[in-house]
Amino acid sequence: MLTAKDVMTAKVFTVAPDDTVRNVAILLTDHGVSALPVVDGDKLVGIVSEGDLMRREELGTAARPRSWWLNIFTDSAATAADYTKAHARHVVAVMTKNVITVEEDTPLAEVADLLEKRRIKRVPVVHEGKLVGIVSRANLIRALATARDSQLAATAAGDSGIREEILEKLRQQPWASVGAWDVTVTDGTVAFWGRYRTEEEQEASRVLAENTPGVRSVEDHRIPIEVYYGAI
């Protein structure tokens, strides 16, 4: 099982809380990254990203002053925070402070769930509060690109072993109409026979078979269940 440590970038460029916003912009540009962890000594205290620098007075992109009547319904703390984001000179004033992190041994599946559910592009990896790396969406894509084909071509216990493994995996899936299918395996070629309820179910079962060690190809001879009953 892959973990955050297996795919993370260990050499991470960082900044300090008292670094300038301008220096952050230079580092982001020079190193081609979209965010920089903020560390105080060895401790991770925040992260500053491109998004934190979008509303800046220097760019003319600062939030526009609200009309007097709109200010009546606006929290003054929010407008003060907008001003700080647009004018602050140091990282500590613009960085995101409540940083979501993972441990080195966090399973990669959990990291992916976190990135997706929180709608973030990267997550720092820590060990006892100390920054040791970062996992980004790009790291996950690279891991996918470099996955060894041998993982899928691993030795299986012959055709009968492949068939049993596929059927066992299918039985564990709530979407699979296993009782409506027959599965045969000949020289590593899997063939599905029978009926399927939906195209999504058909595709998912093919993908499951393709990812079973020892499978060379998949043939699908199933027909939609409505066609089957219409012929009776």
Image (cartoon, grey):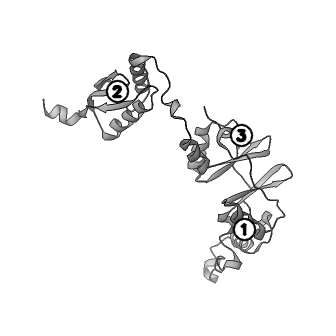
SS of the residue under disc 1: helix
Which is more N-terminal, label 3 or label 1?
Answer: 1
Distance of label 2 from label 1 (alpha carbons) = 54 Å
Around disc 1, counting alpha carbons within 10 Å, would you say few (fewer than 14), some (14 to 19), or many (20 or more)? some
What residue is at 52 percent from the left and 30 percent from the top? 150
Distance of label 3 from label 2 (alpha carbons) = 40 Å
- Give, as a three-letter code, the residue at label 2: Val
SS of the residue under disc 3: strand
- Give, as a three-letter code, the residue at label 1: Ala
User: In the image, which is nearer the foreground, mark 2 or mark 1?
Assistant: 2
Label ID, residue 103 = 3
User: In the image, which is nearer the foreground, mark 3 or mark 2?
Assistant: 2
Label ID, residue 25 = 1
Label ID, residue 195 = none
Q: Position of residue 170 (x, y in %)?
A: 40, 27
Whether tag 3 and tag 2 are in contact, CB under 8 A, the answer is no
Q: Vertical placement of 149 versus 82: above or below?
A: above
Please identify the quadrant where the N terminus is shown.
top right
Q: Position of residue 40 (x, y in %)?
A: 84, 54
Q: Position of residue 205 (x, y in %)?
A: 37, 33
Which is more N-terminal, label 1 or label 2?
Answer: 1
Q: Mark 2 = which residue?
A: 190
